């Protein structure tokens, strides 16, 4: 799995990827993240990548030329399964989308900024537009980090416990059950007896009941 991320502030993402689960994925050779500074592809000598919107209005627009040059340089090296634009007016991110994206080989993520990118970038290159929720961020970088993290943790071998991604909240449209560790009692609060019983079938049943009860209470829309 290779993910290329295009941004006007790639430094924002550098520290995140250097300290997250993704670093271990890279060290194990399971995933590669490559950050690209759109400014490196600026066509003018001032390295300018944004300009006023035709027709007026507040806010700058990321220009088509630098982004087109950057995407084309990458597309000359490999074929991308998806070229994704992170934007608040995209399709809302969902675990099922994450699952299917995690099966791809090469993904390109474009982070928007200011008032967004020139529409021709979207028309020419973008195969998919994704939002991480109904609120507005000042740039697409946080959204790209969210998306890359959610995808890469599903790549086989990235998580220590191979089964843990399968028991995530949302993986079966159910919230995950409560978890406990030692001590078995803390300030009078005891770990549910069944979890100490060693009876695997009963434990599975308890977890399923807890998942259904929690989902019914907190996220009935998922059922
Ligand atoms: Cl992908 N970008 C921005 N700027 N804001 C967002 C978003 C993306 N998803 C939710 N809000």
Image (spheres, rainbow, N blue to C red):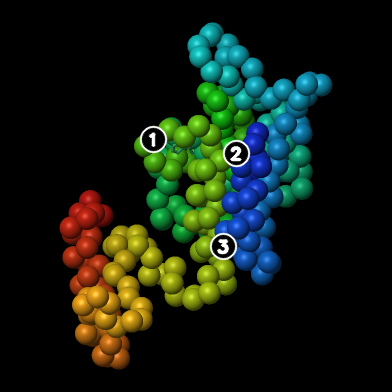
The residue that disc 2 covers is 110
- The percent position of residue 80, horizontal first and vertical second, equals 64, 48
- Find residue 114 and report its image quarter: top right
C-alpha distance separating marks 1 and 2: 18 Å
Q: In this view, does 12 lie above or below 97?
A: above
Image quarter (top left, top right, bottom left or bottom right) of the N terminus:
bottom right
Q: Residue furthest front?
A: 187
Label 2 crowd (10 A; few <14 / some 14-19 / many >=20) = many
**Disc 2 secondary structure class:** strand
What residue do we see at 59% from left, 21% from top?
Answer: 61
Q: Which residue lies furthest to the bottom in this view?
A: 198
Q: Residue furthest top?
A: 55
Label at residue 135? 1
Asked whether, in this view, residue 10 is left or right of residue 73, the answer is left
In this rendering, does residue 118 appear at all?
no
- The percent position of residue 104, horizontal first and vertical second, equals 58, 57
C-alpha distance separating marks 3 and 2: 21 Å
The residue that disc 3 covers is 21
What residue do we see at 65% from left, 48% from top?
Answer: 14
């Amino acid at each position: 799995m290779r993910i290329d991320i295009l941004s006007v502030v790639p430094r924002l993402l550098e520290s995140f990827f250097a300290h997250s689960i993704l670093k271990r994925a890279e060290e194990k050779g399971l995933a590669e993240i490559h950050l690209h500074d759109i400014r490196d592809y600026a066509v003018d000598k001032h390295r300018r990548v944004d300009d006023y919107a035709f027709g007026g209005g507040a806010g700058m627009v990321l220009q088509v030329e630098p982004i087109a040059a950057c995407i084309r340089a990458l597309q000359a090296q490999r074929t991308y399964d998806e070229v994704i634009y992170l934007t608040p007016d995209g399709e809302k991110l969902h675990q099922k989308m994450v699952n299917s994206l995690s099966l791809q080989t090469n993904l390109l993520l474009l982070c928007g900024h200011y008032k967004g990118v020139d529409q021709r970038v979207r028309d020419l290159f973008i195969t998919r537009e994704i939002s991480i929720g109904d609120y507005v961020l000042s740039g697409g970088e946080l959204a790209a980090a969210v998306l890359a993290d959610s995808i890469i943790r599903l790549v086989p071998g990235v998580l220590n416990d191979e089964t843990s991604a399968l028991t995530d909240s949302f993986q079966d449209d159910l919230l995950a059950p409560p978890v406990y560790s030692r001590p078995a009692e803390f300030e009078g609060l005891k770990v549910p007896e069944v979890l100490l019983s060693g009876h695997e079938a009963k434990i599975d049943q308890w977890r399923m009941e807890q998942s259904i009860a929690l989902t019914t209470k907190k996220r009935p829309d998922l059922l």
